Image: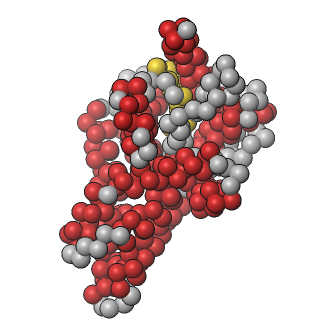
Amino acid sequence: MRLIEQLKVWRRLLGRVCLLPAMLVARPAEAAARTKSEPEILLGGQAVLEGVMMRAPRSYCVAVRTRKGIVQKREALPRPQDRWRGWRLPLLRGLATLGQSLVLGIRALRFSADVALEDESQATGKKQELPNWLLALQLAFSLAFFIFLYKYVPLVVATWFERRGLEGGWLGFNLIDGVVRIGLFLAFVAGVSLWSDIRRVYEYHGAEHMVVYNWEASQPVSIENARGFRPEHPRCGTSFLMVVLLVALVVYTLVPVQSFGLRLLVRVLLLPLIAGVSYEVIRAAGRHHESAFWRAAVAPGMWLQRAVTTRKPADDQIEVAIRALEGALEVERAVQEPAAATVN
């Protein structure tokens, strides 16, 4: 493979790593019963390089389209609450679910990148693999980018206003900090949408949501039926991040530290708490979707999905999402049957 082709794959992977939190569809930590005899299988997912990852409570499947067809990776997935009952508690369950989702999302991205490189290798006759150090470097860059853009820069702007007496007190300082943070996030997701590769991600993102809706409606999952659903989903990572930004604005206001260094440290250290609270908001909105209050809570994220982070997919993209769902369900049912037999 020519170096320029390899760099393209790496660039596409970096863009998706930076967008990873906005691409995830959270799967609630607990499942209600669809019927008395059959538990409901609640799904989450993520768009990857030319594909989709779907996850169920105890399984996941990544489906990626190549020149020769669709390839899959499917595996069983142990639940955090099965390892420690404390992960069932409010706030902690959100951290466990989100942490597992991020780790799984990185694994799915790695698989899709390897498939992309292998696909290019078959076309050029030169075998290429994604080095582990490169993925680690991209993750480190993404974390540093997140802290710099969404923690450091808003604090610098708010401090500039404070030093000139224009912030309007402690509440005004945090309001400026929060508004700048939200503005930077909106500018980032809108800016990267100009990349043709990221537009493809947003299309797969829409396909993932439509297929999840199709499954949740208890209808036969097909391209035709999935077409009847919208590409925005209330449990999407985009909605979650919008809730995170709003919750952070409130939480930071409650911590009256004064120095720049302490303010920055507090913003980093409180991330787990903010993420846990935000997960509970998204979870409640999903469980009480008919409530006007909870619909309003996720409305900004739904609007952002509609405007930027989801696109109407092509039929072949919906097909990939369906294959990912079918693979996850196949493993999930195989895992559940032995568990049910043990209980009985």
Residue 135 x %, y %: 32, 38
Q: At which x and y percent is residue 236?
A: 56, 47
**Which quarter of the figure is the N terminus placed in?**
top left
Q: Is residue 183 above or below residue 166?
A: above
The image position of residue 288, as x and y in percent, is: 65, 49
Q: Is residue 71 above or below residue 210?
A: above
Left or right, residue 172 beside residue 300: left
Picture residue at 24% right of the left edge, 76% below the top: 258
Instruction: Tell me the quarter of the image containing the C terminus.
Output: top right
Q: Is residue 62 visible?
A: no
Q: Which colour assignment does the render follow?
A: secondary structure
Residue 154 lies, in percent from the top left, at: 36, 71
Rendered image quadrant of residue 201: top right
Q: Nearer the viewer, residue 37 or 98?
A: 37
What residue is at 65 percent from the left and 20 percent from the top? 38
Residue at the far bottom: name it. Answer: 165
As rendered, which of 305 and 38 lies closer to the eye?
Answer: 38
The answer to which of 298 and 181 lies nearer the viewer is 298
In this orientation, does residue 272 appear? yes
Could you tell me which residue is drawn at 59 percent across and 59 percent down? 297
Quadrant in the picture for residue 193: bottom right
The vertical placement of 151 against 87, above or below, is below
The mark tally for this picture is: 0
Q: Residue at x 30, y 80 (%)?
A: 159
- Above-or-below relation of 19 to 343: below
Which quadrant of the structure image shows residue 177?
bottom left
